[in-house]
Amino acid sequence: MSYEQLEDWVAAECGEEHRRRAKVLWKWLYRDGHWAESADDMAGISRSFLSLLASSGARFSSLRLHSVRTAADGTKKVLFELSRDADMPLSDRPRRLGVVETVLIPHRPGRGGGGEEEGEEGEEGSSSGDEAEGGAMSRSGVSGVSGVSGVSGEHGSRSSSSSSSSSSRSKGGRNTVCVSTQLGCAMGCQFCFTAKMGLQRNLTAGEIVDQVVQIRRLFADEVGPVTNVVFMGMGEPLHNLPSVLTACTTLLDPLGAHCSPARTTVSTCGLVPEMVEFSRHTDASLALSLHATTDEVRDRIMPINKKHDIKSLFSCLSDLFPNPVVPRVGRGEEEVGRREEDRAAEGEMGEVGGSGEGHTSTTTLQQSRKRHVFIEYLMLDGVNDSLEDAQRLVTLTAGIACKINLIVFNPHPGTALQPTPLPQVLAFQDVLVKGGRKAYLRHSRGDDEMAACGQLGQVPRLTEKNRAAAVV
């Protein structure tokens, strides 16, 4: 729940006179080194209030640790059991149970951090873990970005926690947590193992945030502080938008989990109305899982494209993430490429400035707080990896402030898809770079424990129907 919701809950359960104590409770739940598991873990709180908390039946954790699997490279896949909701009708309870998977991608000594190849602060994502990999650049923090909007009262004023995050990162490298937002997924992407589960249920905001809290509690002493959070685990985050927005509010709160907006990234397969809504209500970064440059291919590997095609996706991105130096229309491809190469050489790519004529208020808001969108592109051998695809991607992204992450495909049981050979990946990347784009290559992490991108989920028995669906 958000801080305001916690205030209201405390007032309702413990009495209006205790509303002010929500601030102390909030800090004990989320601040570094606190992460209280029960009322017994909290100090400096009156016994009468702790007694009221105990009598309310409040639970400090919504997930129960099931198991931890550690890959050879140190990546950890953490399985959490979902709790039974006693207030739910008996007939609905079985659908509410299950195991959700979270991935911790720790920094690797000498290589800069978990997801170090990703390049920029929030862009390492991972449907599992390997999406925390990609380029090799660094950038300054998010100075000037405000904390969660709309939080006031006893909680006090907020300021960005970027300086704190930067300090933590410099001490221990980049540690990325990849959280799940649904048990299963309804999007049916052909390259994703989670899709074979179907959608069983949405996770609550508490269950999403609890993944980050428990990872911190479990592994802070071993790997150091969590510096990055990516919503790229099981499920389509924007298909569970209310819970995701509330979770982002809690995670970005400087007096709570104080994650940096630039290092908190939410991925989507392309739900256009929800992309706009998301950008209006949170400072967290956005990543679009594109994975194809033509509707013909994207229709086959990502069924959602039949509802939100490539044209509608990039129209939305043009409004939300305009590149102010490169006009979106009225300029030839050669000139667009030249101007963007100039900007790349000057280190300016992705910096969003003033708004142009005809931009909506959403765009103006976006320009004031976000610099770019991440374009995720899974490299599939013989499917979407031609040099013509690369050139189309250059053209599609003209006029959009973006960074492109090329993802190594991780095979899983039942798939007929194969990863693109490295020489072709590098040739593809070269076309993008020569076209003035920032393009980063991600390498798999955790694939030996099915913790890499697209490998999360539990599918008890692979049927012939599942196998047939995997053939593209």
Image (cartoon, rainbow, N blue to C red):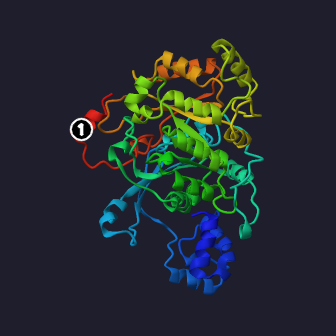
- Percent x, y for residue 212? 54, 57
**Looking at the image, which residue sits at the far left?**
464
Q: Nearer the viewer, residue 224 or 321?
A: 321
Q: Is residue 418 above or below residue 100?
A: above
Task: Give the residue at mark 1.
Answer: 465
Residue 163 visible here: yes
- Would residue 339 appear left or right of 122 to someone viewing this image? right
Q: Nearer the viewer, residue 117 or 454?
A: 454
**Looking at the image, which residue sits at the far front?**
358
- What's the residue at 64%, 46% (across, down)? 280
- Percent x, y for residue 149? 70, 55
- What's the residue at 66%, 23% (across, down)? 328
SS state under label 1: helix
- Percent x, y for residue 84? 38, 68
Residue type (three-letter) at the residue carrying disc 1 = Lys
Residue 420 visible here: no
Q: Is residue 203 above or below residue 50?
A: above
Within 10 Å of the Cα at label 1, are there few (<14), some (14-19), or many (20+) other Cα atoms? few
